[in-house]
């Protein structure tokens, strides 16, 4: 049995390939797989596109605003914007409302006369929601005008203030091992870390659960003994695990491709413009809201910076490590799930085994906050080396940059880990699949581990 | 040389001994009945022959050589716990299982189509298994067991799940397969079919083989030399003379039916000669024990020991 001839190895390989093929095709052909494959990227593309699209849509309608300024401070200060037209009226409030809102459907900005201090209150009347860009612009203009007046009143030339204004723009650079500097931005990294960590968690669980379900189906439909009279239980188990892993990879790769395709379609088809331009406009609005119109140029710089950072994310590394840690983590957990599926008879019995086995995985996701706060703490490092937590934790750490030795150690341990769990699982599996109507507990499984097949 | 031989096969699960030195010999082109109550160890022995389970000690020889996992392609096994993928199409599934037994795609397709036609389920090729009746699923299951033309066929309770018509269809197929050269092991606790089908039997009880041999030889071994005579006569016969013992005598439809035990030094011919002088004999036959009787007797004897 140990000295297998070349021919019998070939036959065994062919049989394993047959199993992989069946497991793969039977899942990929399912409607649910097709739906998931299309729906996933559609949602991802939508989360990127929708804000831009909505902003574009709300700005598309031109707004006219009548200004009724009783103070006279703001005469000529409101300038026409791309979608906003300003004009001044000099009636009293009631007549003004009558003329503008009721007759023309415009908006009315009313700045009440104030005796004591500077005018800091204004009222905007409108039949529709004015929109963020309108309120942000009005606020920024009023702020600028009143501030300047106050400065002048104190004998300070606003130009001096303007020229003395310093914008602190903190750019963090990360120096990698080759000494090459790279711009980094923790916000982007945090987002990426959470996304990658949770995605890998879902992938491991989703496809691991399919292994569990598949094994249980074979056991409960009683086909398993028919099959293991032709192949070894180990071949059936690994064939199933590998087949489902390939389903997962197919889904992941299709998601990446389709997300890009959908982004392209949305970009050209629906909006008819360049997405990044729309994104920049949103950025500008945010800038106006926070810093006033004079800092618009800074906003553009920041956007360029975001673009730089996104380009700075090594997508190749991210995708490659995602695939590696998905496969490693999946193989580790799926083999244990296969053992559970082989051991139990009924769905209800799976819970007592599923929970302790998947606990490290759930724990990893619960650690998200701790990891992204201190991606290089010794806790983070240890968790990213331990095979049961490393798939999720390492994916969270990678966007922040991880020393190469840690990546290699973690990868090596993960490979050893799944070889170990597969070996253990095979022993439980081959005994379990032939046991019917027996209530299985940990003591029983311990006995199986000690048995010779 | 027998096709299959097990020599002192022993298997334990922890403290529980599932098989204790079981030796059987299955002759070529014969039907071998493996009998025993539930839990006796039949399925364990079959799994060891199929290399599904490993034995602790002993030998399993196929064609005189130690059996290896590669030999499973020479075996067709219909397990007691059997089923099919419910969501898979019938034809696709049969192709898959045939290829797992090492058949080429073309070969599998050709042979399966033939079997499907023979069993009149050709039109079900593209249907899902879950749409089939239980009986039809069993037919498919039988086909995938035999399609790769195995030398050795092992049926574990093959008739469960079949209606009487299909049981007969199956019996005919089993005989035909034997006549075409296959050797068949047939495991059951249903004795009625054993006498009809089997050439040899082995009786396993409590992990041990307690009886084995050619079926007629076993029946002869267990016969108690009782003859049943049917005759018409105005009066009861008299068994004057030593060596014959009248066990029972009753009147059925105007005829007498007597059961007579012959002592060892007398023969059935001597009994006949005695009877012919007294009455008109219309029936004379030896009362043989059924396999069921032997089975129960042996199992009970074993229990008391």
Image (tube, rainbow, N blue to C red):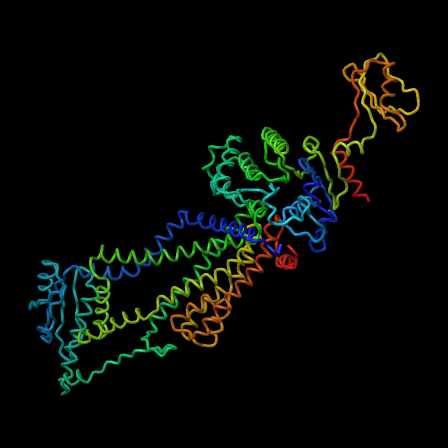
Q: How many marks?
A: 0
Q: Position of residue B88 (x, y in %)?
A: 47, 42
Residue B141 as seen in the image, left or right of residue B270: left
Q: Quadrant of the N terminus of chain A?
A: bottom right
Q: At x 21% / y 62%, what residue is drawn?
A: A274
Specify the farthest residue to the top.
B234
Name the residue located 52 percent from the left edge and 48 percent from the top edge: A217
Q: Is residue B39 left or right of residue A154?
A: right
Question: Looking at the image, which is closer to me, A183 or B221?
Answer: B221
Residue A372 versus residue A366: which sits nearer the camera?
A372
In percent of width and height, residue A161 lies at: 17, 84
Return the x and y of residue A49 as percentages of the image width and height: 27, 60
**Residue A327 in the image: above or below residue A221:** below
In which quarter of the view is residue A271 placed? bottom left
Task: Return the residue found at the far right.
Answer: B241
The quarter of the rendered structure image containing the C terminus of chain A is bottom right
A179 vs A349, nearest the viewer? A179
Point out residue A60 in the picture as x, y percentages from the top left corner: 17, 59
Of B163 and B272, the residue lying toward us: B272
Extreme-bottom residue of the structure: A155
Residue ID at (47%, 43%): B87
Q: Relative to A97, is B187 above or below?
A: above
């Amino acid at each position: 049995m140990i000295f297998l001839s070349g021919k019998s190895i070939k036959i065994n390989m062919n049989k394993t390939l047959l199993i992989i093929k069946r497991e793969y095709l039977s899942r990929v052909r399912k409607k649910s797989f097709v739906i998931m494959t299309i729906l996933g990227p559609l949602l991802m593309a939508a989360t990127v596109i929708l804000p831009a699209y909505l902003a574009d849509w709300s700005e598309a309608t031109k707004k006219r605003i009548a200004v009724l300024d009783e103070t006279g401070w703001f005469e000529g200060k409101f300038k026409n914007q791309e979608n906003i037209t300003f004009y001044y009226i000099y009636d009293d409030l009631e007549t003004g409302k009558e003329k503008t809102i009721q007759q023309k459907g415009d908006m009315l900005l009313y700045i009440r006369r104030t005796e004591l201090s500077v005018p800091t209150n204004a009222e905007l009347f409108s039949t529709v929601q004015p929109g963020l860009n309108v309120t942000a612009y009005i606020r920024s203009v009023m702020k600028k005008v009143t501030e300047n007046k106050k400065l002048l009143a104190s004998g300070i030339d606003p130009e001096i203030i303007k020229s003395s204004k310093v914008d602190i723009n903190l750019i963090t650079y990360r120096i990698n091992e080759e000494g090459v500097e790279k711009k980094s931005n923790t916000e982007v990294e945090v987002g990426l870390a959470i996304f990658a960590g949770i995605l890998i968690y879902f992938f491991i669980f989703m496809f691991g659960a399919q292994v569990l379900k598949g094994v249980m189906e074979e056991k409960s439909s009683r086909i398993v003994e028919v099959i293991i009279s032709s192949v070894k239980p180990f071949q059936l188990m690994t064939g199933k695990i590998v087949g489902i892993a390939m389903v997962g990879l197919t889904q992941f790769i299709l998601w990446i491709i389709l997300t890009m395709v959908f982004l392209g379609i949305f970009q050209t088809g629906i909006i008819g413009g360049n997405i990044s331009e729309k994104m920049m406009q949103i950025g500008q609005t945010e800038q106006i809201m926070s810093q006033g119109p004079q800092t618009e140029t800074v906003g553009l710089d920041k956007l360029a910076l975001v673009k730089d950072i996104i380009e700075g994310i090594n997508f190749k590394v991210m995708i490659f490590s995602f695939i590696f840690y998905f496969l490693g983590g999946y193989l580790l957990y799926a083999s244990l799930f296969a053992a559970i599926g082989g051991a139990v008879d009924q769905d209800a019995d799976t819970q007592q085994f599923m929970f302790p086995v998947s606990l490290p995985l759930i724990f990893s996701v619960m650690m998200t906050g701790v990891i992204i706060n201190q991606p290089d703490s010794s806790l983070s490092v240890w968790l990213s080396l331990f095979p049961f937590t490393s798939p999720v934790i390492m994916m969270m750490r990678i966007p922040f940059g991880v020393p190469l030795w840690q990546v290699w150690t973690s990868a090596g341990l993960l490979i050893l880990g799944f070889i170990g769990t597969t070996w253990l699982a095979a022993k439980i599996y081959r005994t379990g699949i032939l046991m019917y109507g027996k209530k299985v507990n940990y003591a029983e499984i311990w006995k199986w581990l000690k048995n010779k097949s | 040389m027998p096709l299959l031989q097990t020599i002192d096969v022993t298997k334990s699960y922890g403290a529980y001994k599932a098989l204790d030195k079981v030796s059987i010999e299955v002759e070529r082109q014969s039907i071998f009945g493996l009998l025993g109550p539930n839990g006796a160890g039949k399925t364990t022995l079959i799994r060891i022959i199929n290399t599904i389970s490993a034995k602790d000690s002993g030998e399993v020889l196929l064609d005189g050589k130690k059996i290896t996992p590669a030999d499973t392609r020479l075996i067709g096994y219909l397990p007691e716990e059997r089923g099919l993928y419910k969501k898979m199409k019938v034809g696709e599934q049969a192709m898959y299982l045939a290829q797992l037994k090492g058949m080429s795609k073309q070969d599998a397709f050709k042979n399966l189509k033939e079997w499907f036609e023979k069993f009149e389920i050709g039109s079900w090729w593209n249907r899902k298994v879950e749409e089939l009746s239980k009986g039809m699923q069993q037919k498919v299951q039988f086909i995938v067991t035999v399609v790769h033309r195995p030398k050795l066929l092992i049926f574990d309770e093959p008739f469960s799940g079949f209606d009487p018509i299909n049981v007969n269809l199956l019996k005919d197929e089993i005989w035909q397969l034997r006549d075409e050269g296959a050797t068949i092991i047939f495991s059951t606790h249903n004795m009625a079919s054993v006498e009809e089908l089997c050439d040899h039997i082995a009786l396993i009880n409590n992990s041990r083989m307690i009886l084995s041999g050619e079926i007629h030889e076993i029946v002869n071994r267990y016969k108690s030399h009782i003859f049943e005579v049917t005759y018409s006569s105005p009066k009861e016969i008299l068994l004057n003379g030593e060596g014959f013992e009248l066990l029972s005598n009753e009147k059925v439809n105007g005829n007498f039916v007597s059961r007579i035990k012959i002592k060892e030094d007398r023969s059935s011919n001597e009994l006949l000669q005695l009877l012919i002088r007294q009455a008109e004999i219309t029936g004379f036959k030896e009362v043989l024990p059924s396999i069921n009787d032997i089975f129960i007797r042996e199992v009970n004897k074993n229990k008391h020991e």
